[in-house]
Amino acid sequence: MGAATLDELARRNVRVCGLEQFDRGHRRGSSHGRHRVFRKAYFEHPHYVPLLCEAERIWKQLEAECGIPLYDRRGVVVSGPPDSEPVTGTLQAADAHGLAVHVLSPAAARTRWPMLMFPDSHRVVVDPDAGILAVEECVNQLLVRAERHGARLCWNTPVASWSFEGDQAVVTTVSGDTFRAERAVITGGAWAGTFLADELPPLTVRHKLQVWYEADAVSRNTLTGLPAFFFETERGSFYGMPSGAGEIKLARHSGGPVVQDPGSPGTGADAEDGPVACFANRFLKGLSPRPVYREPCLYTMSPDSHFLIDRHSRFDHVVYGAAFSGHGFKFAGVIGRILADLVLDGRTDLPAEFLSAGRFRGSDPP
């Protein structure tokens, strides 16, 4: 989200500097892991759909400019009990916004995608206008474009504190350096709760595990036509997608151990290996018996699992974006535009009011 905001501000000819505590392309959040799913018929809430339409436009524009594949529109298939949130929410979002999704019987879905084992008790919904994003390259190209338009990037520059003095935001780094600016945007990821402790509701950071399995020789031939997929099961929510040469990426969307210190998350994500392996054994065919690659990430969640995007309640020229984990990366481009609007103009034309932190101060939730 920080990279997208830098990019948006720089392209508006704003003099902007970004401070990041880790290296460029670090793996200490939830913006890595080769690929992430892009869905448009959004079961989390229909209000997200207009933002996703704008996000898709931004990704396609970035892809066209850089000439590097970023978005693979291969569709997403959602499978679960007929009354489950992913199924009913996908259909509701599609109906509310006129999106072209269609329903398949489990038998028809198994015939179409023989690697996936859809239970007869499930309902299967296909969102063809969806796919996967090449996550690291997306972030890199946002940064490349931001730099090209004059953004200054400071890596390995952890922030110790921030304040607002007079008409300036003052940021002090761990090394004692001071940065001053007329306005500030805070996109702290798993550290957002630290820098916005008096502003945000309690955030929960979870340690998640991304796991890659190799497809056998027979199944590998079907990967080209395999969509991304999301399964709601009695053991939780799981997702996956083709990711890497002859490989499938899997992860559990629900659950995950809670992390108290995101700087030292420990090895709790290793416990996710078992549930993911059980999912792979039951719902997929043709995979290697053991993972070929594993990588953890951090989910940062609000109490209702929706994003937090707002102006600071005490400082008009400070805005923030937080709690995007679990389903946020696909929105990065449009979040950058919203945050840029808010910090420059105090408002945005994009329909993002439902994500205001005010919902935790007495307003209705999304």
Image: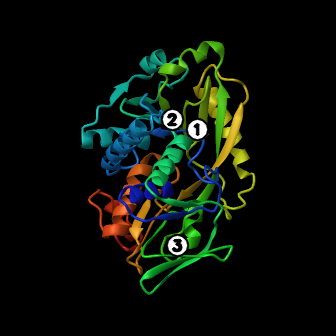
CA separation in Å, label 3 and label 1:
30 Å
Does 27 sit above or below residue 41? below
Distance, label 1 to label 2, CA atoms, is: 20 Å
Image location (x, y in percent) of residue 92: 31, 42
Can see residue 327? no
Quadrant location of the C terminus in the rendered image:
bottom left
Residue 64 lies, with reference to residue 172, above or below; the image says above
Percent position (x, y) of residue 152? 52, 61
- Relative height, residue 330 to residue 243 (above, below): below
> Which residue does the image show at 57% across and 50% down from the upper left?
30
Does residue 102 lie above or below 83 as drawn? Answer: above
Tag 2, which secondary structure?
A: strand
Identify the mark nearer the N-term, 2 or 3. Answer: 3
Give the total of numbered labels: 3
Q: Residues within 10 Å of mark 2 (few under 14, many from 20)?
A: many
| Type of colouring | rainbow
Q: Which mark is residue 196?
A: 3
Q: At 32% across and 62% down in the image, what residue appears?
A: 353
Farthest-out residue, top: 218
Give the SS element for disc 1.
loop
- Toward the viewer: 183 or 28? 183
Graded by Cα atoms within 10 Å as few (under 14), some (14 to 19) or many (20 or more), the crowding at tag 1 reads some
Mark 3 residue crowding within 10 angstroms, few (<14) / some (14–19) / many (20+): some
Mark 1 lies on residue: 34
Q: Position of residue 183 (x, y in %)?
A: 42, 73
Q: Which residue is mark 2?
A: 231
Looking at the picture, how far across and down is residue 44, in whole percent?
40, 48
